[in-house]
Image (cartoon, grey):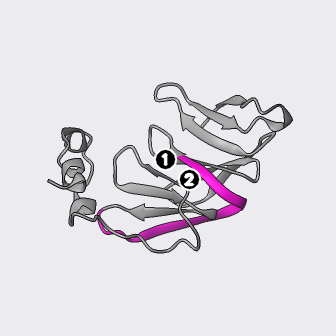
Amino acid sequence: MRAAERLCTRPWLKRRNRPEALAASPRGRILAGHDGSVTCVAFSPDGWTLASGSHRTVRLWDTATGALRQTLAGHAAEVKSVAFAPDGRTLASGSWDQTVRLWEVATGKPLAWLPCDDRVLALWFDPVLPQLRVADAGGAAHVPRVYLLEIVHP
C-alpha cells in the first residue's frame, strides 16, 4: 500500500468528516495557482477548505473540487504560516513582512492587520479560548517571542 493510500484510509480522516476528494488518486490533486513556492498550508476545521500561503498571498481552495475560492492579498513578503480559527470563520496569516493579518473566510475580507517586532514564523489559534498565538524570529536577541492576542467577533 502506498503512503498516500495509507494516509487517506486513516480513521481520523473519517472521524473529522474530511472530504475524500483529495484522495481520488494515489498522488492526490495538484492545485495550481501560486506564483512561487507554497510555504504553508492548513485545513479548515470542517475539512472543506484548504489555505495555502506563498509569496505575498494566501489562497483558499475547495477541497472537494480543487477550485480556487479566494486569493487573499496584502502581505509585502513571504507568507510563512496560516491557521484557521476553531469555528472556521477566521483565517490568520503570518509573514516575513512582520505582520499578522486576519481574514474573513467566507468573503476574503481583511479583518485586521497586526504588526510584530520581527518576521512571523508560526501562529496558531487556541482550540478553546478566543486567542491567537504568534511566534516571531526574536529580533537581534534571536530569542523567539510569543504574542497572545484576544480575538473578539463583532
Q: Is residue 73 magenta?
A: yes
Q: What amino acid type is highlighted by mark number 1?
A: Arg
Among all residues in the image, which is located at the extreme left?
1
Name the residue that disc number 1 marks: 89
Badge 1: residue crowd in 10 Å (few <14, some 14–19, many ≥20) = some
Front residue of 105 and 25: 25
- Dot label at residue 104: 2
Question: From which residue to which does the magenta span run?
Answer: 64-82
Residue 136 in picture, x, y percent from top left: 71, 38
What quarter of the picture does the C terminus occupy? top right
Tell me the residue at 17%/48% (across/down): 9
Residue 90 in picture, x, y percent from top left: 53, 46
Check whether the beta carbons of the residues at disc 1 and disc 2 lie within 8 A of each other: yes
Residue 39 in picture, x, y percent from top left: 55, 56
Residue 145's place in the image compared with 18, above or below, is above
Front residue of 51 and 142: 142
Q: Return the disc, 1 or 2, that comes first in the chain's sequence.
A: 1
Is 139 on the left-hand or right-hand side of 87?
A: right
- Label 1 sits on a secondary structure element that is loop
The answer for how far apart the CA atoms under marks 1 and 2 are is 6 Å
- Label 2 sits on a secondary structure element that is strand
